[in-house]
Image: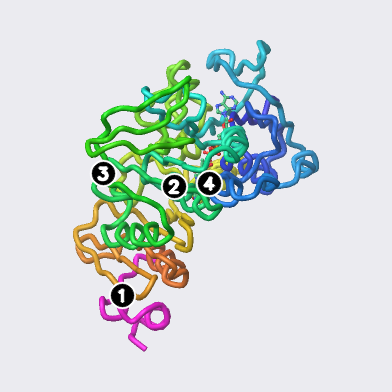
Amino acid sequence: MSGVVIVGAGHAGSQLAVSLRAEGYAGPVTLIDACEETPYHKPPLSKTFLKAADAAPQVLRAASVYDEVGVTRLTGTVSEISPQARTVTLGGEPIPYDDLVLATGARNRMLPDLAGASNVHTLRDLTDARRMRDALPGAGRVLVVGGGFIGLETATALAATGRQVTVLEAAPRVLARVAAPETSGLIETTLRGLGIELQTGWESRGWRQESGRMVAAIGAEGEVPCDLVLVGIGAEADTALARAAGITCNRGILTDACLRTSLPHVWAIGDVAETPHWQADGAATRLESVQNATDQARHLARLLAAGGDTPFRTVPWFWSDIGPLKLQIAGLSDRADRRLIRAEEGRLAVFHFRAEQLIAAETVNCAADHMLARQLLGAGKTPPDDVLMQGAKATKAWAATGQAA
Ligand code: FAD
């Protein structure tokens, strides 16, 4: 018996390895990653890790746990899948599988103009984070290209260390693709209050370069000088291995609702997977979040251990720490046709509806509303507007009794 081979030991792969055992899977489990590190949490890399020179990576689980549950960890880049032989190639050697799980995650995009400059960084893994942290002592002026989650988290983390930080965003507002205008507005006000210079609608006219380093971004209205640049313009699924094996891919590796790819005995989970989503009328959807990665892993562990055809279905949720703001999103809002806003000093709740059904909630510093929204979405319940506007206590009472308190 060859067992389950997992390529990628990030949030998804590592969870799958231990969940297989928890679900009673008795065959061999092999977990392979290009990186030697004990699998670690990625979110702190753009939050706490950069702030302290001695901050250590936070492991997902102690290295000994993998040994204790009988998971074999191997290091190296898997270079090929041979579907006929049912093997993957690692260091030139074939490794056989009964089931293969691709959990290869995503890779950051880079601006071609900036590639190769010695003071330009991206943030995806521990190597990136260490490289950037090592460069910070000589970097008083930091330029962040991109007002997405990683860019904004890093901007606030570095501003907290006393650096002068500028964020350049091409769209008219930060988080334009993923958040409501009211959320973007609160975040922008907060960033400016922290002393971060924010330029939205940035029109790039190129870069000034000296001795292989970027020294200024050139825009329509002038130059912004910099000592260090972080490019945070999003990521693309790491589908190279799957494509080379002939597996059907789109923006990610396409799977069915049970996380099966187009190749027999090959599955995909986490950032790399593009899966039919119940909240998107079954449209193939690729999500980048810890919740999605770990929940897909747990689901697949059940399928591989016990068999069956249960489709993957959870309420998607996500969080981001942007300075003093905790942004939490439950559900997918892109199909919404109406939104309801409850704004208080430094706090915000935005409820998204489609055909009067609650489909998502975005909250800032309103953790109780977020937790309730997850429950409501899971149960398919939509409280009346006036209840949602009264806050979490009233919503909780309504959820319990179906009546306003
Ligand atoms: P990953 O965790 O990226 O793991 C993929 C692994 O595959 C990598 O270790 C890679 O080395 C390995 N690999 C790839 N190809 C091969 C190969 N051919 N051979 C061997 N190994 C291979 N999400 C949130 O919900 N909240 C947050 O606040 C948040 N903050 C984030 C901050 C940062 C800086 C980053 C980068 C991400 C953040 N995310 C956050 C997203 C979250 O980390 C990802 O959604 C999650 O890591 C996805 O897990 P994964 O296992 O699919 O991919």
Q: Is residue 225 magenta?
A: no
**Label 4 or label 1, whichever comes before in sequence order:** 4
- Answer with left or right where residue 303 lies relative to residue 171: right
Residue segment shown in magenta: 379-405
Question: Which residue is denoted by mark 1 in the rendering?
Answer: 383
Which element type, helix, strand or loop, lies under badge 2? strand
The residue that appears at 50% across and 20% down in the rendered structure is 241
Question: Which residue is denoted by mark 4 in the rendering?
Answer: 46
Nearer the camera: disc 1 or disc 3: 3
- C-alpha gap between disc 4 and disc 1: 36 Å
**Label 3 or label 2, whichever comes before in sequence order:** 2
Image marks 1 and 3: residues in contact by CB distance under 8 Å: no
Q: Percent from the top left, x then y, of residue 205?
A: 26, 29
Which element type, helix, strand or loop, lies under badge 3? loop
**Ligand 1 under 8 Å from disc 3 Cβ:** no
- C-alpha gap between disc 1 and disc 3: 33 Å
